[in-house]
Structures are given as structure tokens and as C-alpha cells.
Image (spheres, rainbow, N blue to C red):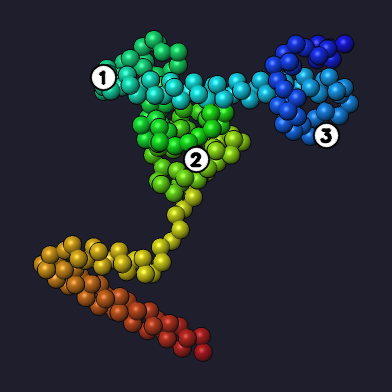
Amino acid sequence: MTTSTIEPASIGDYSIDELEAVDLNDESVKGLAASQVRYVKSKVIDCNEALGTAGNAIYAAARALVDIKKDVKNKNWKALTDSGVLSMSGRNARDLATAYETWLSNTDIPQDALSQVSARTLAKIGSADSGQRVKAISAIQEGKGFSEGDLNKLLRKKAAKKSTNDLLAQAEVVASKKTDEEKLSSFTSLVMENIKLKKENADLKDKLSKAKEFVK
């Protein structure tokens, strides 16, 4: 008989409603006695609460690191984080501080979900553009874990091509900021480029015509 077949006292820490709220699928409890099912549910709650505590601790550590960084800057900051006085590597400490400064302090992330993301990934999210950052944060909030590899795939995705109207509007903005002299210079360059392209087009047409004659 295993220890889980005996209904431990720790189950009493949770109400019936709390235990019933843990939705175990049929495959996970197949062949288990009712007491074993209750035991497993209590341990699931314990596990989830521990993950939440871990996430809260990560957030608190990041906030404390930023407070340190406010007074200990530049070389002193790197020296401190690499000194071994912190219960983490210097790289992790700097990454956590970066994440807190760039986005984590202003974002609602479930604590249990936060505990499943590395400090490196959290820091890299801060350097992503706004659209990519929103997607990354949404993935983290789902609580299924989000790795650095997941983030890299997201960052590699090419941005959608801008529409013709967007490109024209962008060109108008650029043109409006140029002086009359710069506009004249740009116009002259465009005219010369247009003449060059027309000549190249004519040469290609002539070669194509000669090729067709040769085939005949």
C-alpha cells in the first residue's frame, strides 16, 4: 500500500469545493480509489500554489534588483551582479532587472505563468516591437509555458508588407521634411534613374526582338 492510498491529514487543508474544482481527466484517475483521487487533487493544488509563490518571488526579486540598480550603476552594477552575493547568476540578475524596467512592472502576468519563463526570455521580450511583445505576453498569460525558442520564432516572423497607401503616406512625410534644395536634388536623381531604366528596357526589347528573328 502506497502512502497515497491513506488519506493524509493535509487533505483537510482544503474544502470539498476546492478539491472538486480540480478537474482531473478520466485517464489520469483511472483505477484510483476515491481517497487517492482526493490526495492527488490536494497535491495538484499544492503544486499550483507553489508555482504562484515562485512567480511572485521572481517578480519581487526583479523589483528589488531594479531598486539596487538605481543606486549601483554601470560597472558597479555589473560587478555586484557578478560578485556571487546574489542567489542567481549575474546574467539572470541583469535580465530580470531589464525585464522589470522595460515591461514587466506594467503588465499583468499570472504568477504561476511567470514562474515558467526564463529570465533571458523575459528580458528579450522587452526589446521586441510592440506587436511582437503583445503576442509574447498573451502566450505567457495562457500559462502553457513560453520558451526562448518560442520567442525567437515570433521575432523571426516577417512583418506584414505595407500597403501602397502606407508607402505613399510614408514618402509624403519624408518629402515634407526635405528642403527645396534636397527635393530638387532628389528629383534630378529620379529623372536620371528613369532615363537609365528606359534605356535598359529598350535594349532588352531589342535583344528579345533579335532573339525571335533568330528562332524563325
18, above or below 182, in the image: above
Q: Quadrant of residue 178?
A: bottom left
Q: Is the residue under label 3 in contact with that under label 1 (CB below 8 Å)?
A: no
Q: Dot 3, how many residues are within 10 Å of its Cα: few (below 14), some (14-19), or many (20+)?
A: few
Q: Are marks 2 and 1 in contact (CB under 8 Å)?
A: no
Secondary structure, mark 1, is helix
The number of discs equals 3
Mark nearer the N terminus (3 vs 2):
3
- Is residue 134 visible in this depiction of the protein? yes
Residue at the disc numbered 1: 71
Specify the quadrant of the image occupied by residue 30: top right
- Helix, strand or loop at mark 3: helix
Callout 1 crowding tier (Cα within 10 Å): few <14, some 14–19, many ≥20:
few
N-terminal label among 2 and 1: 1
Residue annotated with mark 3: 26
Question: Residue 29, located in which quarter of the rendered image?
Answer: top right
Give the amino acid type for the residue marked by disc 2 in the picture.
Ile
Q: Is residue 182 left or right of residue 84?
A: left
How far across and down, in percent of the image, does residue 206 sit?
37, 84
Kindly identify the residue that appears in the image at 17 percent across and 72 percent down. 188
For the residue labelled by badge 2, is the local secondary structure a helix, a strand or a loop?
Answer: helix
Q: What residue is shown at x 42% (from left), y 86% (from top)?
A: 209
List x then y, in percent, for residue 138: 52, 42
Label 3 amino acid? Asp
The three-letter code of the residue at mark 1 reads: Asp
Q: Looking at this view, is 99 or 110 the one in front?
A: 110
Q: Which mark is residue 137?
A: 2
